Image (spheres, rainbow, N blue to C red):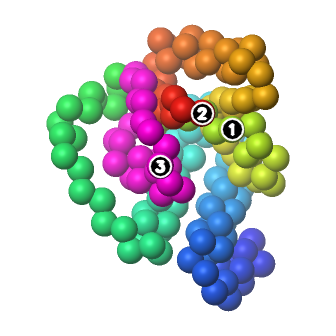
Amino acid sequence: VGLLVLVICICQTRFARAWGLTLWYASAIALKGLGVSEDAEYRSIARTLMREWSEAVLRLFTINVEVEGRENIPPSDTPCLYLCNHQSSMDIPTLVNVIPSYFAFMPKMEIRSIPVVGYVLERSGHIFLDRSSPEKALVAMNQVAAPALRSRSFLIFPEG
């Protein structure tokens, strides 16, 4: 963790600092979640720290987010399926920042191999999308459909 602080401080580019922040917060989620057996409790820890992460990344890039129509987002206890276009690396921090409830999303399978980040995403209920074949992608989509009907919101970037 101390090494991550050093990386964040000495990195010359904002992109490298953003990755440092991502690894820092993923490590914090993993450490706070040690010994937590309940999925809901782990997701609560992840949600809190993911929101802090998103605010830090948006501040780093001096991005101010203005939201129109927030009143149209259902209450946090209503499961939703959010569909968005994925235009930049700022989409995830922006959406984590503006969507009031916890949601899982479908990161591409390659993200699973990033140390700590992949573990935290899997443990907190995100479902990885294997884009290597339509059949494997369909399996992941079906995994989203069942929990979404129960009480979890999901964010999907359809072009993925």
Q: Amino acid at mark 1?
A: Lys
Q: Which of the marked residues, 1 or 2, is nearer the chain's N terminus?
A: 1
Quadrant of res 142: top right
Front residue of 62/152: it is 62
Quadrant of res 124: top right
Q: Alpha carbon of mark 1 to alpha carbon of mark 2: how far? A: 8 Å
Q: Position of residue 159 (x, y in %)?
A: 54, 32
Q: CA distance from mark 3 to mark 2?
A: 11 Å
Question: Which residue is denoted by mark 1 in the rendering?
Answer: 108
Q: Residues within 10 Å of mark 1 (few under 14, many from 20)?
A: some
Whichever of labels 1 and 3 marks the residue nearer the N terminus, that label is 3
> Few, some or many C-alpha atoms within 10 Å of disc 3 (few <14, some 14-19, many ≥20)?
few
In the rendered structure, which disc, 3 or 2, sits on the residue that comes first in sequence? 3
Q: Secondary structure at mark 1?
A: loop
Badge nearest the viewer, 1 or 3: 3
Q: Determine whether 95 is above or below 3 in the image.
A: above
Q: Using the rendered view, name the quadrant where residue 19 is placed.
A: bottom right
Residue 22 in the image, given as x and y percentages of width and height: 63, 62
**Residue that badge 2 annotates:** 160
In the image, the segment drawn in magenta is 79-101
Residue at the image position 73 percent from the left and 46 percent from the top: 111
Residue 148 percent coordinates (x, y): 50, 18
The location of residue 65, given as percent across then percent down, is: 30, 59
Q: CA distance from mark 1 to mark 3?
A: 15 Å
Q: Which residue is mark 3?
A: 87
Amino acid of disc 2: Gly
